[in-house]
Amino acid sequence: MFKAHGDWRYFVEPPVIYVEMSGSFNKEAVASFSTEVGQEIMKYPEQSIQYAVVNLEQFELATADSIEIAKAYFQAVKARGYKRVDYIKANIIARNLLEVVWSGVEMDIYFHPDAESLFQARPEYENLRKWLK
């Protein structure tokens, strides 16, 4: 077993979860992330977290063997009530990976080139500025 590689932080303020991911993620990191965040959102009633904002400005890549774990995580959050995910600054590698991972899961997915474009498109997320690094 390898050591988990990749870093994250998250904040929950229903109905939104904000996540920042940085570095390169291997299978172990995706599994750790899925477990940790999954346990956190289980503290809230189903349907109470409906929107995710994921900042990928510092994200580099994820290994191919992590895709199935990510797919299972995405299916689980969809089942708990997620309706939409907004990604900030997803590079071409991340965007391609996310399109593969979300395939087959009905979810509204949006990609924003930067945080300002997110706030223009979703003014209701203005309060998330406090979580941006």
Image (cartoon, rainbow, N blue to C red):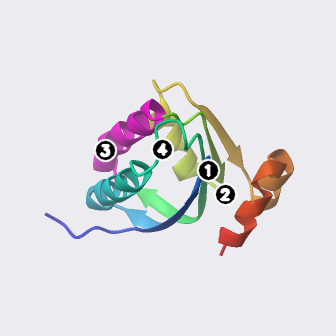
Q: Position of residue 63 (x, y in %)?
A: 34, 54
Q: What residue sits right under mark 3 in the picture?
A: 69
Q: Are marks 2 and 1 in contact (CB under 8 Å)?
A: no
Q: What residue sits right under mark 4 in the picture?
A: 97
Label 2 to label 3: alpha-carbon separation: 22 Å
Q: Position of residue 90 (x, y in %)?
A: 61, 53
Label 4 to label 3: alpha-carbon separation: 13 Å
Tell me which amino acid carries mark 3. Answer: Ile
Going by the image, does 63 lie left or right of 112? left
Any part of residue 19 in sight: no
Q: Return the residue found at the far front.
A: 45
Tell me which amino acid carries mark 4. Answer: Leu
Q: What residue sits right under mark 2 in the picture?
A: 89
Q: What residue sits right under mark 1 in the picture?
A: 16
Label 2 to label 1: alpha-carbon separation: 18 Å
Mark before the other along the chain sequence, 2 or 3: 3
Label 1 to label 4: alpha-carbon separation: 23 Å
Any part of residue 54 in sight: yes
Disc nearest the viewer among 2 and 1: 1
Q: Position of residue 130 (x, y in %)?
A: 71, 71
Mark before the other along the chain sequence, 4 or 3: 3
Disc nearest the viewer among 1 and 4: 1
Residue 73 belongs to magenta span: yes
Q: Are marks 1 and 4 in contact (CB under 8 Å)?
A: no
Mark before the other along the chain sequence, 3 or 1: 1
